[in-house]
Amino acid sequence: MIKRGQTGVISIILIVLIVLILFIIVWNLFYNIVKKSADKTNTYPFTTFLEVDSIGLHFNGEAEVLLHTISGGETDVSKLKFQMHYTDGTSNTMILENGNKQMETKIFSITPNFIETSKKLSKVSVYPIFEDGVVGMESNRKIPRDGLLNPDDLVFWHRMEQINLPSTLIDTTGNFPGQIFEANQVPGKNNNGMSFDGVNDYVRLADSNQIIQYNNNFSIFAFFKANQIPSDGPIPTNNRIITFHRPSLPSVAGTAISFLFGDTDKAIIRYYDGACQPKYFSASNIEANKWYFIGLTYDGENYRSYLDLAKVVREDTFCGVGDFDAFIGAYSVNSAVINGIIDEVMVFNRSLNDNEVIAIYNNLK
Ligand SMILES: [Ca+2]
Ligand SMILES: [Ca+2]
């Protein structure tokens, strides 16, 4: 009669044997396939790994992927497969040739043609492809929340991320820091934003004509969220998101361009035309406590206004900007201040095209 202890030992031996046999079968199948291809191409699929060091998104939708190899062997990588993953769970792939086939450290630019610019990119995966088509192991990196690159035409970009105490708001371009009055850093549209309580809160910037360098070529963008939407008069002037002032006529500066909200449910872009008369773009669909993207481009002939991606085009002239300070969150000192949150305020010294505006919106939303 077999004792209980002996049964246990036999069971364990049997399990170990089964596992061992399965392992040998799987290993032989797998190893031979990989070994065959490795021998053929003189590469080392088991030891050739890529690492994605960083991913930067350009404002035109392009992605820059910095890669390096972390293997010690020969790395005869002839191509690279890039897989773009989006926040809606979909993905698409593209394959790039790898020039001299050596890897070390390289930057690959993925043009907007290969990125679905109507979607928000969440992650990029990269796979090495060896000489005979064997695809190596995946390496990936999530899109960092601050992974957007400063483009050349950017004049300022107030991301509301960095404050030099006690009160200097840092512009990521380094060009135009702001001076903060009472406003506070809070969670924003993209990381942090700046909260303005409607009483004496604003950010004072440089002269309007230092920031808007070309009166006939500029773009301005911001994200905003209203704490409440007041029922202003027919021409609302409060709740300024950003204001640039026109040339002194003859002594007092007034609005040249301003983004604001009011009049129950309107997001408004004011500008002064070539005769220095006020004009408005007005979109009647905003609600309190909801983020919106607002933007204006001008190329000397046409204005294009954006509220999220709803666009209005109008042919018109421009009065120009003068040397009075520009303001975020106000018209001027303690004047027409905003009750809400502002984030990602950008100025470019040229008129961006639709695709660029859409890419900015998607990269930051
Ligand atoms: Ca921000
Ligand atoms: Ca206050």
Image: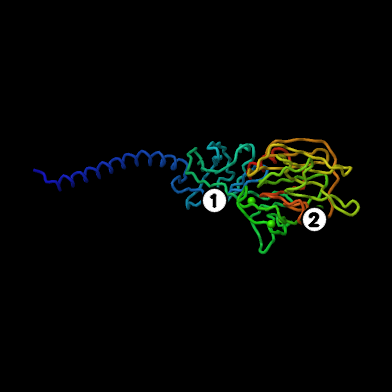
Identify the residue shown where x is 70% and y is 35%: 310
Rendered-image quadrant of the N terminus: top left
Going by the picture, which residue comes out furthest to the right? Answer: 250
Question: Can you identify the residue that label 1 sits on?
Answer: 68
Q: Is mark 2 within 8 Å of ligand 2?
A: no
Q: Amino acid at mark 1?
A: His
In this figure, which residue is indicated by the disc labeled 2? Answer: 325
Residue in the foreground of this view, choosing between 105 and 184: 184
Q: Amino acid at mark 2?
A: Asp
Give the image location of residue 224, x and y in percent: 67, 46
> Is residue 93 at least partly visible in the picture?
yes
Instruction: Pinpoint residue 87: horizontal percent, then vertical percent.
Output: 55, 40
Residue 137, percent from left and from top:
47, 44
At 75% from the left and 52% from the top, the residue drawn is 330
Disc ID at residue 301: none
Q: Nearer the viewer, mark 1 or mark 2?
A: 2
What is the quadrant of residue 94 in the picture? top right
Q: Residues within 10 Å of mark 2 (few under 14, many from 20)?
A: many
- The correct choice, above or below, for 202 with respect to 231 in the image is below
Q: Check the picture and name the quadrant holding the C terminus.
A: top right
Q: Is residue 153 visible?
A: no
Badge 1 marks a residue whose secondary structure is strand
Q: Report the front residue among 154 and 71.
A: 154
Asked whether, in this view, residue 362 is left or right of residue 82, the answer is: right
Q: How is the image coloured?
A: rainbow
In this view of the protein, which residue sits in the foreground, 98 or 196?
196
Residue found at the very far left of the displayed protein? 1
Q: CA distance from mark 1 to mark 2?
A: 46 Å
